[in-house]
Image: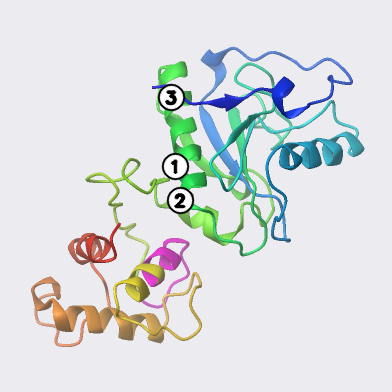
Amino acid sequence: MSVNIISRGSWGAKPWTSGVSSVPLSERTEYYIHYDGGTPITRTGNSIPQAIEREHLNNGWSGIGYNFVVDQAGNIYEGRGWNLQGAHCPSHNRSAIGVQIAIGGDQAPSDAALRSARALYDEACAKTGRQLSKHGHRDGFATECPGGRLYAWVQAGMPAAGGGGGVGGGTVALDPGVKPGVNHPQVRLLQELLIKAGYGPIPGAVTDFYGTNTQAAVARFHDRHPEFKSAGVSHDVAIGARGFAVLQKEAGR
């Protein structure tokens, strides 16, 4: 498989201000997802990597620090590329391919952006000959990056709309840590699916917390699908692995 990458020359990148070390593909073992920060992004096209480059140059870096940038239209822009050391996460700049999805704050990533980021991951695995581990920036550094929505997507296995990344095409597996009363990034996905499939409303959603409002929506799901209830439970508030898979299908995943 190959992906279409807009080269540095095509988006107007400036020359590197100093030398950037090469990294053999044999050293790449990780794939890190980032976002732009606390403010939603309204820029489009080449202005996206150009703005990141200006910021990173102002930081005193050699140029744009990410290996690649993906915009909401699904375009992929070359930064450090496959063979240069990144500047995106301390202690992981050689081992990891760093990819920024150009959103900020609680801005929702588009399906096109997620498909491209996933395709880029698959290409990275093909080039390195191994499955790279998937991470959000906060896994390697104390930061809010890549935000709640993208981090939940990473934790869910980076599924892409239209298939890939999960169990049975676009379906993703339920993390065993997702249960009533806990905070977990995948709870956001659960809430979004419940609402989309018609089991809402869920007041206060979308959040990482599996609270009583989420439990009530799950109970409504089980009222319609009693075959997925836990044995001996009349009011089941835990979604369960089989129920989660069926819920995804109902929500059109």
Could you say which is closer to the camera, residue 205 or residue 209?
Answer: 205
Residue 201: x, y in percent?
39, 85
Compute the Cα span from label 2 to label 3.
21 Å
Q: Which residue is mark 3?
A: 125
The residue lying at 85 percent from left, 41 percent from top is 55
SS under mark 3: helix
Q: Which residues are magenta?
A: 180-191
58 lies left or right of 139: right
Crowd rating for badge 2 (residues with CA inside 10 Å; few <14, some 14–19, many 20+):
some
Q: Is residue 239 above or below residue 49?
A: below
Q: Is residue 128 above or below residue 180?
A: above
Residue 95: x, y in percent?
59, 25
Residue 222: x, y in percent?
18, 79
Mark 1 / mark 3, whichever is N-terminal: 1
User: Quick one: quadrant of the N terminus?
Assistant: top left
The residue lying at 29 percent from left, 53 percent from top is 173
| 216 within the magenta span | no
21 lies left or right of 70: right
Q: Which residue is mark 2?
A: 111
Q: Which mark is residue 185?
A: none
Could you say which is closer to the camera, residue 47 or residue 90?
Answer: 47
Q: Which amino acid type corresponds to the residue marked 1 in the rendered image?
A: Arg
Q: To which quarter of the image does residue 57 belong?
A: top right
| 190 within the magenta span | yes
Q: Which amino acid type corresponds to the residue marked 3 in the rendered image?
A: Cys
Q: To which quarter of the image does residue 180 belong?
A: bottom left
Q: Does the CB distance between marks 1 and 2 fall below 8 Å?
A: yes
Q: Which residue is mark 1?
A: 115
